Each structure stands twice: as structure tokens, then as C-alpha cells.
Amino acid sequence: MRRRTNNNNNGNNNNKKNNDNTSSSSITVDSIKKESSGTTLRQSDATETPEDILADSGLYKIDDRPFWKRKRFHFIIGVSVGALAAIGAASTTPTAQNHFNELQTYLALQLADIDFGGATDVVDELFGNVTGFFKPSPSSDIPFMPALSLKDELDLKPHYPVVLIPGIISSGLESWGTMEKSQKYFRKRMWGTTTMFRSVLLDKELWTEHLKLDSITGLDPEPGIKIRAAQGLDAADYFVTGYWVWARIIENLAAVGYDSNNMHLASYDWRLSFSNLETRDHYFSKLKSIIETGNRNEGRKTVIITHSMGSILFPYFLKWVEDPNYGNGGPSWTADNIETFVNIGGPILGVPKALAAMLSGETRDTMALGSFGAYLLEKFFSRRERANLLRSWGGASSMLPKGGDSIWGTNNIAPDDPIFGFQGAHPSYGNMISFTKSNAEASSSSASSSATTESSTKKLNEEHLDNRIGNHTTTSSIELLHENSSKEYHTMLRSNYSFGISTDKKQLKKNALDETKWSNPLESQLPNAPDMKIYCMYGVNLPTERSYYYAKSKNSHEEIFCDESNMTDARCQAQNRAQRTKEEYEEKAKEFLGSSFTGTALDEMLRPPELFINPDVNDPVHGVETGVRFADGDGTVPVLSLGYMCEPKNGGWTKHADLYNPAHIPVVLKEYKHEESESKLDVRGGRKAGDHVDILGNWEMITDILQIVSDKGNNVTQRIFSDIERYAANIQLV
């Protein structure tokens, strides 16, 4: 079996448990070198068959983690804490009481269903220290580590000014509206903090009204509603009390001497499309000023540290700042102002879960709630409502998969298939969306008879439906999204983003003038800054969403009579929204089909079928759970997207540097293998976490960042654990 290891890590395996329990003083330079150095080894066994490899693959193992480390348990505890925080301000209206009664029932059923057998010590530790959940830091965390232990030994100190750019949903959003319905939220966070939980639980409609953007402009939904990004370092240090995001990196930078004079967090309203960030908030103009001011004050260029969507936003900014019609910084601005671009967990080529979220309002997390949890979520915040809200956020669509079938694969083969050309029991990963029948639909169809009429209208109708409902690659999945969304969303998507690929140098030069291409590294070029350095850092060894099994629903809903007496009822409001959507699709269908298509055929085609991830598809041995198929990654972004552009031999910015990195900017890729913490209550993964967010607390990665900002980046060297080298070799761009 082929494996990838670090040749210097083998000798440390016996000390793994001891390292997790040692005090801060046990961290040494030698231990860092052992962690960070190494080469890639390949071992193979010629006697093994493809079936053996698939059966042994760690990607497809059943989740055997103890219950206290599973997302379901975290969800129950998290919702409980959020509900407790909200109860203090809960109204006594029937609607609020109904929500809490349903929540109480759900939590009781979920907790009753968990098997606590053989784990009484965990239960005692958990419920004997409930107050620990309200502390800012989990008990296993040590503040300001590893910086305090290593700053003298490694001579860590501020050298370059630093700007932090967070990812999607990281920055807190606060209300600045002064109209009557907004006054109670004035300068309170509508995203982040317990205000958000209270608002969603007790007044979902008003919260949605504030958070949703205008479907045409992509800006504030109405003049009186103003949601703006919180500012300063505390805008993204904690999401809510006790759940840190950037806090660990900020406190470690402070421990080696940084403060608010030479460290800035450039928060932004992640709901906005990239172009609207400048239109409404002048975000890029402010970011340009922060960087230039820091350089003048410090006399040195800036290190930019980005996370998640911030790693897509920053290359867009580099194109914007040089463009004469926008930032007007000129072609040398990046070379003059940027020392290093540190990309942490960047979905450089997008994420499949963004596609699922936009298409049906679902992700792996919603599918993991179980049948009753899904019912409760659907009743409280339906798939259609979630999808419509997400589609109004132009920024979220920047994370849709890029590169098309050349990167993500065809119906028959994908670069990251378990074995290239052999897929085993399931279709290639290239089938981003595979349509199946749910158990209920399969039972229904077997009992129904087929129609006998073969009119031309019916034939055309079937052809259209067959084209829409089938297996879809990434390219056709995005087209499916266009078909199943409003005209406004369709326009927003095409006017802000491009998800293709350009392999012609002349075309890439033209793309430099097209802002829709700037967030796609396969349709744009890095700036002319040969002295700049790029570090790509991300976690691996976690099951990550890669493709989906979908089904379609034709269930009709009972119509409710609504008049002035009950128009505020949530069911009436939902019915009215559905009617408006139906009318919108009627106009769309008539434009597409013409007046000749009427009756049943028109009714079938004018409304796209309600699509949903099929929870009946389960095959844990082959990495499929509740309709979601998994591959290697950081739990959110697949390795293919995290690493392809940075892969040293066949990557987009390395092998194809003449196309996408003409200045041949040095690129270093470093992977961090996720290792579970031994602490039973360390739900954030501990000091060796590789999770998409929890990696911001990974001690080794923090040490690497501290060395980079201290002008010791040469100590941070390449390391690969995953199969990204094989994936990149399988991609043929030219």
C-alpha cells in the first residue's frame, strides 16, 4: 500500500503521548526541526490489488471517534449553551415558547440516543465541570503558547508589519440601522456573540431581513437596514465567547512583541461580493492605505496572513490595487509593499460544499443532525430559506469550485479518485452531483404506472428533465445551479465571478482587465513580484466533502387559507414567499418555452424540482454517509483545492508558472497532519489540530508563522503528507 510519511517523524511516534502532556518548557528548537523537516517517501506492495487498497484506505474508515469528539455531541452541547444564553431575553410569546419546546424535545431525544456505555468517567468530567464551557479557553489550552516557550530560543521578535485577513463568517457583523425595527440591535452583533442566537431563535424573520442582501444590487436590502463588519482585532478573535478564531495567533504575535501599531486585522463584510466590498465599504482602498502606512512607519514590507476565503480575496486585491481604473498602484505595487503571502487553509480552487449550500441549502453538517434534527431544522429554517439567504450573499459564491472538469474531473475519472481510473463501488469524484431516488420515491415509483402518450410536448419535457436530473460534473453542476436559482442570482454570479480555466497567455493578459477573473487563479496571473514569497499551509487527514448524492422531491404541501387575521403566521409568510417564487418561475418558463407549452408539461418544467441531498445513501466503508461522499482534506476544503496551485512539481503556480506565476514567485507548501488531542474535553482538536478553523491554534503552524514574521522564514520548509503530488500529476492543463 502506498503511503506518504515524514522520514524524521517516525522516531517521534513513541513520544507522541508524552509531548501532548508536557509543560510549556519542554518545547525546543530540536522538536520543531523534527516536526518541520523531512522528505516524502513512497512505499508500494506489488501484491496488493486495487480492491485491497480501497478496503484499507484510511479515507473510508468508519468514524470510530468517541462520542464526545463527534460533531453531533458538539452540536447538542453548543445548542444547549446557546439556548441557555437566549432564555434570559426570551419573550413569552407562543411562537417563542413553541421554538423552545421543540428544542427541548429534540435535545432530550438526541441525548437519550447517545450511548454513554463505558464512558462514565467522561460524563462525570463533563457534567462535573459544566462551568468550564463558559470560560474563554478550553482547559487544555495554554495562553500565549508556544511563543513564550520559544521566543528566546528562536530569537522571535517583530520584524515585518502584519495584516491578518479572515475568512468567511469569521468577522463579526453589527447593526448600525436606526429605523424602529433595528433600534434594539444598534451596534450589537447580528453575526457572532449571543445576540445572534437570541435573534435567530426568537425573531428569525427579522434577523433574516437584516442579514439578507438585496437580490439585485447585492447591497443593503433597504435604506434603514445597515449591517457592517466589526473593526479592530476583536472583530474576529472570537466568534462567540469561548470559541476562538484568530485569538491564538493574535496572542502569540503579541507574546513576541507585536501590538496594534504593527499588527492589523482587516475585517470585512463577507456577505458582499468582492466588487461590492469596494463599492459600499471602500474595503480595498482602506486595505491599501493600511499596508502603505505600515510600510512607511516600519520601513519594511508587509506580511499578509490570510485564512479560508481571505486567501481568495487577497489575490483579487492584488489585481485591483494595480489596475489603473481602481487602486492605480501600478505594476510594481506588490513588489514594493508585500513581503510574504501566508495562505492558511485557502480554498484556492473553491469548495464542493459551497455548491451544495447554494443549490439546496445543505452541507455535511445539516445532514449529520439525524432525521428528527433535520425535521426540526427544516421546520424552523427550511432548505429553500437557507439557500435563498446564502444566494443573496455574493461573497459566499466566490467559493464555488473553479477550474471546471479539467481540475475536478469528468463523469468517468477525476485526479483525486482513490485510484486513478479505478473507482470501486462508486462513480468517479468527477460526478460532483449524482442523482438517485430516495427510499420514499423508489417505493412510490415502483407502485405507479407509466404514461402511454408520446406527444411531442411530453418528449421535449422529458428531454429537458433528463438533462437537468442526472449525474453532473462540476461544470454542469454550476449550470444546474443557474437553472435552479432566480434571474437575479444568475446575473450576480455571472457579473462577479468566473469558474473556468485559461491556458493561453494572450487570454490571461486580457483577463487582467476583467475583474470577474481576478478571484480565479486559473484565469489570472500573480503579480510581477519575484522577491515576494508564498506559503500554503493547511491541515490534512480529515474526511472532507467532495461530492454528493442528490434526490428530487415532488411532494405537494397543504395550502393554508390566509387573510388579515393570520398574515403574520410563519406558515402564511412561507406560503406567500413560495407563491412569489412560483410566479417568478412561471415568467422564466414562458420566456424559455414559449406559449405552446401549457398544462401539466409546463407545470412540471416551470418550477425546478426541489433538490436535496439524499440521506438514504450510506456506505461508510467507501466514505459515503447520509448522501455525502468524502475525500482527504481539512474537514472543509479538499486537498485538491488546498494544494494544487502550490504543489511543488506539477502545480499551477510551479509547473505552469509561465501561465499563472510569470514572475516565478517562490512557493512553499506545508501540510499539517491532524492528530486527535488526548484531552476528553478538548473539542477544538488541541495543539496538533488540522481542522479548517482549529488549525489556527496548531502550535507548529503558529511557530512557523512567528518565524516568518521574524524574518526567519527560511526555517519553514516544504512537507507533504497527503496524495496531492499524485493528484497534481493527474491534471493535464495543456
Image: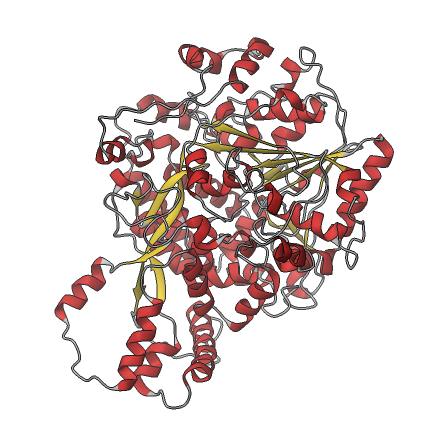
Q: In the depicted view, which residue is nearer to us: 549 or 327?
A: 327
Expressed as whole percent of the image width and height from the top left, the position of residue 618 reads 25, 46
For the image, the number of numbered tags is: 0
State the residue in front, 166 or 109. 166
Res. 28 visible in picture: no
Would you place residue 425 above or below residue 19 in this image?
Answer: below
The residue sitting at 66% across, 16% down in the picture is 148
Q: Is residue 542 above or below residue 593?
A: above
* Whole-percent x, y for residue 664 in the image: 65, 37
Classify residue 607 by image quadrant.
bottom left
- Residue appearing at x 25%, y 26% in the figure: 46
Say which residue appears at 72% left-offset and 53% top-offset: 320
Q: Is residue 717 above or below residue 420?
A: above
| Residue reaching furthest to the bottom | 596
What color scheme is it? secondary structure
Depth check: give the residue in front, 702 or 720: 720
Q: Position of residue 237 (x, y in %)?
A: 63, 36
Task: Determine which quarter of the picture holds residue 445.
Answer: bottom left
The N terminus lies in which quarter of the figure? top left
On the rendered structure, is 295 left or right of 458? Answer: right
Q: Is residue 393 visible?
A: yes
Q: Position of residue 218 (x, y in %)?
A: 62, 64
Q: Is residue 732 left or right of residue 46?
A: right
Of 149 and 353, nearer the camera is 353
Q: Residue at x 39, y 46 (%)?
A: 546
